[in-house]
Each structure stands twice: as C-alpha cells, then as structure tokens.
Image: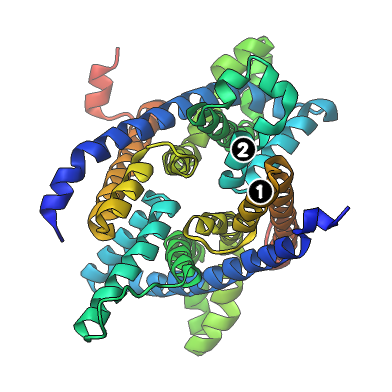
Amino acid sequence: MEWFYGWGPAIAMGALMTLEVAVTSAVLGVLLGLVATLASFSRMGALRWLVDVYSNIMRGIPQLVLILLAYYGSTVALTRLAELLGSGGNPVEIPPLAAGIFALALIVGGYTYPIFRGAIQAIPKGQIEAAKAFGLTPWQVFSLISWPQLLRYALPGLGNVWISTLKDTSLIAVIGLEELTRTSMLATSDTRRALFFYLTAGGIYLAMTLISGLILARLEKRAARGARR
Amino acid sequence: MDFQLIWESLPLLWQGTLITLQLSVVTIVVSTLVSIPLSILRTDKRWYIYGPLEIFSQVFRGTPLMVQLFIVYYGLAQIDFLRQSWAWVYLRQAYWCALITFTLNTSAYLIHIFRGAIQAVPEGEIEAAHAFGLGAWARYRYVILPKAFLLALPSYGNELIKTVKRTSLASVITIADLTGVANMLVSRTFAPYEIFLTAAAIYLVFAWAANRAVHYMEHRLSHHMRPVTASSAAIEP
C-alpha cells in the first residue's frame, strides 16, 4: 500500500506549513502585544483607549471573519491602489499566507496584550523601588528584576495563546493556504477517504498541541524557579 | 464605505444572525448541563472514571474545531453502520453535525473549567459541610457547586464568547449563519469591508452582551461577600 494513499509527503509538507504559519504569527503577535502593552502605560489617554478597543475587538470577533476580511479586504485595497497608480484594472491578489499571518498576528496581539499587562502589574512595586534604591540602572532593573518575573507570570497565558494559534491556523485553509487542513481536504477530494484523512490531520494537530503542552509545562517550571510556594 | 449596500444587506445578515444565535444558545445550554455532572466525575480518583473524561477533554481541546467538524460531517458519513442507523437522520444534516460538534467541543472546555473550579473550593468549606452531616448530594448542591460556579464564572464567560465565535465555523459546512451569509454576500457584491465589518460589529454586540451577563451574574452570586451597606441592609429581609 502506498504511504497515505500517495498523500504522505503532501501531508508532511502541510504540517510543516502549519508550524511555520503558527510560529510566524505567534512571534509577530507577541511583538504586537508588547507594543500594545507599552502603549497602554502611556500618558496619552487616547492611546490607552485605542489599545483597549483593539484588544476587545480582536477577542470579540470570530477568527474566521477576521481572516476572510484580511484576505478579501486586502485584495480589494490592493486592486484599488493599483487602479490609482494606473496599472490597468486587473485585480491584484494577495497570497493567502500573508493574509492569514496578518490576521492571526493581529489576534495574537489582542490576546497577549492583557497577559503582558497583567504580568507587569503583578510585579510588586516595592521590588522596583528597592532595586532603584540599590542604585541599579533602569536596564538592570528591567533585566534582573522585571523580566524574569514577567516571564513567570505571563508564561501560562502565553502558552494557551500559542496552542490556540496552532489550532487557528487551520482556518487559513478556508482562503486556500495549503497547510495541514487544506492538504487533508485535497487528499479527501482525491481519494474520497474523508474519515481517514481528517482523523490523520486531527492526530497530527493533537501531537503538536500535546508536545507544546509538555514543553510549556517545563518552561513554566523553569520560569518559576526561585519563586516562593 | 457604501452605506446603501450595508443597509440593503441587513435583512439577510439578520437571518444569519438568528442562525448564529440559535447555534450558540443550544450549544451553551446543552454543554453546560452536560459538563456539570461530567466535571464532578472528572474529580473522581479512580482512573477508569476520570481517564476517559480527561482523554475526551484533551482530544477536543487539542485539535482544531474545523477538523472536528470535518470528521463529524464528512468522516462519519463513511461508516456504513452509522448510515444504516437512526443516527443518520441527523448526521446527514450539516446543521445537526455543527450542533453536535460545537457541543462536544464546548463541553470539553467546560469540563476542564468546572473541574478546576470544583477542586479550588476551599477544603475547609467541604469539611464544614461534612461536620454538619450533609450527604454527598447536599454537599454538592449547597456548598461545592455554588462556590465552584462563582469561581468558574470569569472563565465561563470567556467560554460563552468563544462559543459564539466558534459557531462561525458552521459556514464552512454550508450553513448560512452570520459568517456564511456575509461570505456569500461578499462573493456576490465584492464589498468585503462593508459586509464583514458589519458582521464583525454584530459579533461584537454578542461578546459585549455575554460580558455584561457574566458581570451581572457575578454581582448577583457574590452578594454574601460584599460588605453590608446601609441600603442593602435595609432592603434585605
């Protein structure tokens, strides 16, 4: 019997694509979340309000709607831009990969912002004051006092976001990116073995999330070393 | 922005909203009712009781909802004895497949949340219930579950919002829910901003409403934990 009815290599590539998209959006999203967190401590009220609205919107609307909006929306926007620049009327299509990562990163940013903010607020003020009183420079305060604890408080939440992101990449299949789910759909329409291929995909996702869970548990343990229990 | 277009698409979007609402409410009610007894069983110490529940919870929380939906809708149709059984009446309809999948998925999360909350009930309160001679039923009914529900409320509220968002996947298996209708309208009018942003706004209203409802419940259920004020003392019998 051929390996996965001849679809083995394609599924492996799809799984890799899933990981790639998840990692890229998670990294970009975490950066976005950090920027939003910095902005939320700004003295400008409008900026703080804007960050809050952004986060609430990202957490309130379905990921699928945002992905569809990013895909079709950017296609329309780019086509209009091309018309303005006078390069004929042919529609410019944005690759599903870019639209998907864009949408997922926005979502990750919206979810990680409250996590980072909560983690910063969880650090007792007295510690920072004590560090300053000892004459530590701002960088030392950050790298020696704030950052290690920030990681400890934020890690459980960040882990949940990572696992959600991993699963949410399956939604990009809807706009045609050939990741794991899309590849299973193609394999199904080719071989008519829906149960087999979707169970396979499910098993691969499960392995990814379970392994992520194990790694995260170890990281959390490491980040919590030296913490009072 | 073409407001004329938004205005004209509102009736159709409203039809989709009703389907989304229907899917969400049924999913939330059924999975809440199912999860409460199952989460109690999940705290059992015998492996053959908590084991299967933990596996169920892990599998449904560890795989994408879309894949689960495809397994139920496209996959189960390939099992011959299911096609011959009574279940086929339901499994061949996208709507029922969506409801079944969403309920299983949300239940997996709720079992996880409720289990954590039950285990977080302070040991002393349970001991006190024992000391008062309360039986298992009375302990759960009057001491453990009310406290656990209060502890679980914030996560439960998040889960309500997530359930509404999850129902958007129904559109992938041809159901004309809010997202499905929006997607159809976009492919017809090619006005993604107008249509999708309107749909997103409707979803935001749901998220906001769920948020308010949870805050209200939290307020109501934590009555005994707030300091007595002159007005509340006067009103309470």
Residue at the image position 47 percent from the left and 35 percent from the top: B153
Residue at the image position 57 percent from the left and 18 percent from the top: B89
Locate residue B237: give its quadrant: top left
Residue B199 is tagged as none
Residue at mark 1: A188
**Callout 1–callout 2 Cβ contact below 8 Å:** yes
User: Is residue B202 found left or right of A207 in the rendered image?
Assistant: left
Locate residue A157: give its quadrant: bottom right
Q: Where is residue B54 in the image (x, y as percent from the top left)?
A: 73, 36
Q: Toward the viewer: A125 or B51?
A: B51
Secondary structure state at the residue bearing disc 2: helix
Q: Toward the viewer: A34 or B61?
A: B61
Q: Does residue A130 appear in this view?
A: yes
Residue B190 position (above or below residue B65) = below
Residue at mark 2: B74
Local packing at callout 1 (Cα closer than 10 Å; few below 14, some 14-19, many 20+) is some
